[in-house]
Amino acid sequence: MIELEVRNSISPSTNHEEIFSEIIDHQARCRHFILFSVHENTSGSQIEIQVVSELFCQIDVTTVPLNVLRFGKTSHHFRPIGVTLMNQYAIFSVLKNKLKLRKFENLEHISISTD
């Protein structure tokens, strides 16, 4: 009962603001995905873009990554890579072809997840 009273006391504009905020957040995230277990190179982010581009070639994806960023601090474990693409349709292409990674012995340990 108290929860219903609290919900009714919140102004409708607050609910609309939350909804708009969630929509904007969802639209921003729909262009991102995360790569796990990709061997790390200490040379920098330009090498990471090249690695992701070569991975795309292996799984027959023709899109080019806009942004590639390693998450976390450098350690003895492989850090995940966040990748941003031009649109959500490019993400669908990557997700549709991600099982092709299993065909390659040197790539079978890599996994792809949505953001």
Image: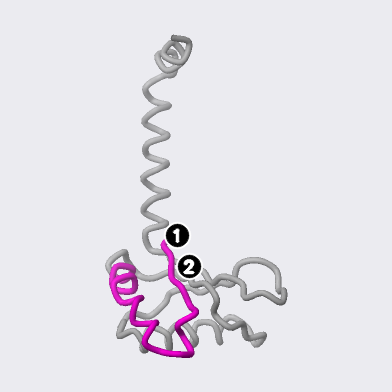
**Circles 1 and 2 in contact, beta carbons < 8 Å:** yes
Callout 1 amino acid? Asp
Asked if residue 97 is positioned above or below residue 55 in the image, the reply reads above
List the residue tagged with mark 2. Answer: 34
95 is within the stretch colored magenta: yes
The numbered disc on residue 115 is: 1
Q: In this view, does 41 lie to the left or right of 104?
A: right
Residue lying at 40% horizontally and 42% vertically, measured from the top left: 22
Q: Tag 2, which secondary structure?
A: strand
2 is within the stretch colored magenta: no
Q: In which quarter of the image is residue 98?
A: bottom left
Callout 2 amino acid? Ile
Q: Tag 1, which secondary structure?
A: loop
- Quarter of the image that includes the C terminus: bottom left
Residue density around tag 2, few if under 14, some if 14–19, many if 20 or more, within 10 Å: some
Nearest the eye: 65 or 104:
104
